[in-house]
Image (cartoon, rainbow, N blue to C red):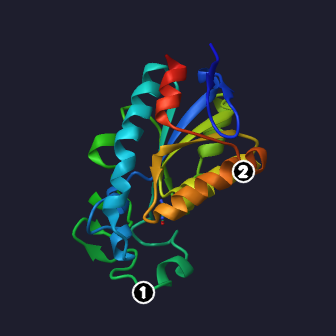
Amino acid sequence: MPILVQAEPSAIALDPARTAVIVIDMQRDFLEPGGFGETLGNDVSLLAAAIAPCRMLLEAARAAGMLVIHTREGHRPDLSDAPPAKVGRGAPSRRIGDPGPMGRILIRGEPGHDIVPALVPLDGEPVIDKPGKGAFYATELEPMLRHRGIEALLLAGVTTEVCVHTTLREANDRGFRCLVMGDACASYFPEFHRAALAMVSAQGGIFGWVSDTTRLLAAMG
Ligand code: C5J
C-alpha cells in the first residue's frame, strides 16, 4: 500500500515494498571519541543527534517490512583497498590503520568500525562494507537493490555532506528516487548539514527529496 510523505520540494509517494532504508556509517569511528572522526579534529558529539531519529526510522521500517541496509566505511587490515591518497592526506592525529583506543583506525573488524550499539543491525539485515564515501563504489549494493525490485531509497546517517551525499549522488545517477531523512543525518559542520540538505531539494529536487522522521512516521500511520 503506497504512502505519501510530505517533503521538500514536494510530497513523495513511496511503495514500502519497493523502498529500502539505507543507514550510512553510523559507526563508533565517526560518532565516538578516539575514532577516525576525532583524529581529523572534529567534535564527534555533534553526530549524536542522528542516533534517536535513525532508531525511529529503523523501527518504523522494520515494522513495515521494508528492506533495511546498513553501511560501514572502512578498510582491509592490510590496507590493500585504501588509496594512498586517502591514507596520506591531511595531518590527522592518527592515520587510517594506526592503533587507537578503539583499535586500528577505520579498519574492518576493529571495535571502532562497529555500528554504534543503539543501531546494531538485526540478524538478516545486510551490512555493506565500503572502502569509499559512496555506498555503490566497489560494493554489491546495486545488485542487492535491483534483485529486490527496489526503486526508492530512504537515506540516513553520517556525515550529511560526505558519505550520505556521495551515496545520494551515486543512487540518483543509477535511477533510484532518493528521500533524505534530514533529522536522521548529521555533520561535524552544522552549516554543511543545512547546505547539503538544501542542495538535494533545490531546483525542483535536483537530487531528490528531503523530509524527516516526524513526517515519515505520520505518513506510515
Ligand atoms: C567521512 C562519512 N566523513 N561516513 N565519512 O569521512 O561521512
**Near-viewer residue (10 or 180):** 10
Q: Which mark is residue 44?
A: none
Classed neighbour count for the residue bearing mark 2: other residues with Cα under 10 Å, few (<14), some (14–19), many (≥20):
some
Does 89 sit left or right of 98 as displayed? right
- From the top left corner, tell me how far across and down residue 21 is, in percent: 53, 36
Q: From this viewpoint, is residue 110 visible?
A: no
Does 202 sit left or right of 126 as displayed? right
- From the top left corner, tell me how far across and down residue 98 is, in percent: 33, 77
Please identify, in this view, whether the residue under mark 2 or under mark 1 is nearer the observer.
2
Residue located at (44% from left, 33% from top): 57
Q: Disc 1 marks which residue?
A: 91
Q: Element type at marker 1?
A: loop
**Near-viewer residue (184 or 127):** 184
Residue located at (49% from left, 16% from top): 221
C-alpha separation, residue under disc 2 versus residue under disc 1? 34 Å
Q: Which residue lies furthest to the top in this view?
A: 1
Quarter holding the N terminus is top right
**Near-viewer residue (211 or 78):** 211
Q: Disc 2 marks which residue?
A: 202
Classed neighbour count for the residue bearing mark 1: other residues with Cα under 10 Å, few (<14), some (14–19), many (≥20):
few
- From the top left corner, tell me how far across and down residue 31 is, in percent: 34, 58
With respect to residue 30, does 181 lie above or below? above
- The amino acid marked with disc number 1 is Ala
Residue located at (34% from left, 80% from top): 94
The quarter of the picture where residue 134 lies is: bottom right
